[in-house]
Image: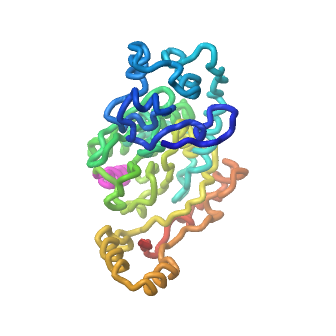
Amino acid sequence: MVAGSGSQKGLALSRLRHVDWGAVHSTIRAAMAGLDQESGQQLDIKNFFEASLAQALADGEVQRRGLTKWTAEFSPPSSPAASTTSRRGFEAIDVAASDRTALEVAQEGIVLLKNTGILPLSGNVTRLAVIGAHADKGVLSGGGSSQVVPRGGVAASEPSKGVDGALIFDPSSPLESIRSQLPRAQVEYDDGSNPERAAKIAAKAETAIVFVDQWMTETADAPDLTLPNGQDRLVEAIVRANPRTVVVLETGGPVLMPWFGRAPAVLEAWYSGQKGGEAIADVLCGAVNPSGDCRSAFPLAKPNCRTPGCLAIRKAHRSALSGEAAAMARSSPPTTARARPSATNGSRRNRSARSFRSGLASPTRPSACAISRLSLMATA
């Protein structure tokens, strides 16, 4: 049990007595011992501090005076634990300000990996194809502690494979945002589950935009850098069907892109949050210049990557070294190819959409900061 000594003002988490995720095992004992907040209740065998605490209060098993002032003061108004005399007033959340911040952060984080001149999309485009990654519903959220239920609810979800939790998509639809930016264009959507069907739709469009994703979460490593669920096959099919194809990545880190040389434009949108769909559409349509600096190396080929097996062997080898040799190994320069900021993809906020259109986004070659021809070596 942890008790902090933070500020007296507001709801300071450091002043609440709470426990680590999954560590609550009772209602009455925990409440009477001074627990203020059940953290990470989704990992407990049940929610001990909602209906159970209310029932314990109603049955007299827990006395209100036995609760700490924080439990009573910050309980929801509908909860019996709430005190009508001591409860503080809370200011309404400024949703509009939150949305503005979320949009700005998403816009500034998008990285232009490649553009051979097809971006930004022309305002005169008449037919577009948008394909894959639930782009009709929202944008992918990373898993683990960073994943929250978004305002407006979950737009879409998928079961994860071999990892607790599920893929959650925030309700910010790139498809609807693109339609809003290009109201005169006919924009057709396909979920990408059938590459051949999606390719037929892409072939009819002036430009195809294919979304692909890779879900990552704490407590689990990605098995490799390959896009899951055969999405590379989808991209290959779309690129063959339409030479004017834009690939939008929603990933937590670098991925292999065997189709990179054939795709005219590639954007890395990462996990772009509650305004991600709007931010992606802003970049695609030229309303915002892509200004994200890529701090990672994207390998151009699989042989450049260390495999999990190599990492395991390397770790075992290091554990067998003497203390002096291990210290020397740890102090040796890392061999990872680190990407550096480049002026080719517009690295500052004040670069406008006009500079994007005029070629600062490097319409002739991949961004030097994003693609490395050096080996991506793991420093275990």
Vertical placement of residue 361 versus 49, above or below: below
> In front here: 165 or 61?
61
- Quarter in which the C terminus is drawn: bottom left
Task: Locate residue 52, reporting x and y percent.
Answer: 38, 22
Task: Locate residue 242, reporting x and y percent.
Answer: 39, 50
Whether residue 79 appears in magenta in the rendering, the answer is no
> In front here: 214 or 68?
68
Q: At 38% from the left edge and 42% from the top edge, which residue is drawn?
A: 133
Residue 208 seen by the camera: no
Q: What stretch is highlighted in magenta?
A: 230-242
Task: Locate residue 9, reporting x and y percent.
Answer: 69, 33
> In front here: 208 or 268?
268
> In front here: 252 or 82?
82
Q: At 31% from the left edge and 52% from the top edge, which residue is drawn?
A: 228
Left or right, residue 161 beside residue 368: left
Count of all numbered marks drawn on residues in the image = 0
Left or right, residue 104 beside residue 313: right
Which image quadrant for residue 316?
Answer: bottom left
